Image: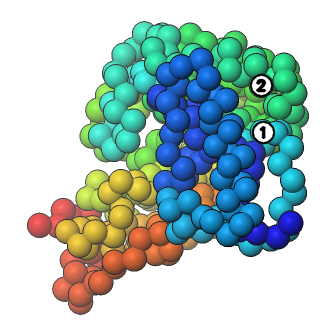
Amino acid sequence: MEYKCCDHILGSIDLSFSGFKYCNEVWEGPEYISYKGNDAFNKNEERRLKIIEEMKNGIIPERCKECPLLELKDWKEFDAKIYKITVFNWKHCNAACFYCSVHSDFNESIKKSDDYDSLPFIKKLIAEGRITEKSFIAFMGGEPTMLQEFPEILSLLIKKGCKLEVLTNGIKYEKLISDMLNAHNDNKICISLDCGTKETFKRIKRVDKFDEVINTLKQYIEDTKENSYKVRLKYIVLPNVNDNKKEIDKFFEVAKSIGITSVVRSVDHLESKMNTKNKAIETSVIKAYEYFAQQAKKYNMTLCEQNWADAIIENKVYNCRKISTLTKIKANLHFFFGKKNK
């Protein structure tokens, strides 16, 4: 049947801090249903079916209307298979990144997730046949490697043959992640370095662990050998911090020296909403974002797509960018010389 819908509504689950929903993109998507109550998951699935029926009748949820993933086409019937799970309910981290939208509790010791344990939920979906070898599961922050249940969950999914990705700060090396990378051609890890110098790392992450991350990267590359392209290094462009030529150049020098062949560029979506108070910084973020792609090409590195970040830069999500000539001049000075805009 032809109607407007998206893959997330038809087969995605986001495990956040306190609830379920279908979408973990920068656009909001349906609101979360709380984990509270034994029937929370069933309520979420009932809502999924209700939204699908509404979309078939042309009724689009308000929070979905501007989503660029919304597509008019002949969608397959809902079969209850899960194509994507985002495990996003961790609260603990061994860094304290100032841009963190999660506001994780800093803790260097292994902790148990205190709001919701994903392990029984993952087991339930496997037992019901809803997770298959075609399912994609992503783990993200806080810091996945800090959780007691992470190794068991990852082991189960490796055995199941799913496609997996771990987004991590790389401070803690985890041998099981190397096993994951070698188990399936589509498995990958993405380490967010966000800089090329110890000084900037400490400013962003608020911990002095730059060398530890570099050593972790080297170990994963050594473990994966010819599969080292699965080790991706990420750079989140941050206003007035690393949105300049000098820091990006240093990032690529470091990446090249340790054998990185795949890089990811992103933006801080909380800081990059094209608001009228941040015009000059926003322009330099755009220039840095473009320059990063140029450098990836120069170093013959694969630039991995991050559609939601592209949507922000291309002004497809927020629409209030009005930039004066003076603003452009200030942004250019910041980008080339790394000086803060006043």
Q: How far is the residue under mark 2 from the one under mark 1?
A: 9 Å
Secondary element at tag 2: helix
* Rendering coords of residue 100 (x, y %): 36, 40
Name the residue nearer the viewer: 84 or 138. Answer: 84
Numbered tag placed on residue 125 in the rendering: 2
* Marks 2,1: beta carbons within 8 A: yes
Name the residue: 29% across, 84% down.
322
Q: Amino acid at mark 2?
A: Leu
* Rendering coords of residue 42 (x, y %): 67, 29
Q: Is residue 120 left or right of residue 20?
A: right
Report the quarter where the N terminus lies. bottom right
Q: Does the image show residue 93?
A: yes
Q: Is residue 8 left or right of residue 308?
A: right
Name the residue nearer the viewer: 218 or 13. Answer: 13
Name the residue: 67% across, 59% down.
54
Vertical order, 100 against 282 (above or below): above
Name the residue: 87% across, 27% down.
129
Q: What count of labels does the image hold?
A: 2
The residue that disc 1 covers is 82
Q: Does the image show residue 329?
A: no
* Rendering coords of residue 266 (x, y %): 49, 56
Residue 219, by quadrant, is: top right
Q: Is residue 34 left or right of residue 173?
A: left
Q: Amino acid at mark 1?
A: Ile
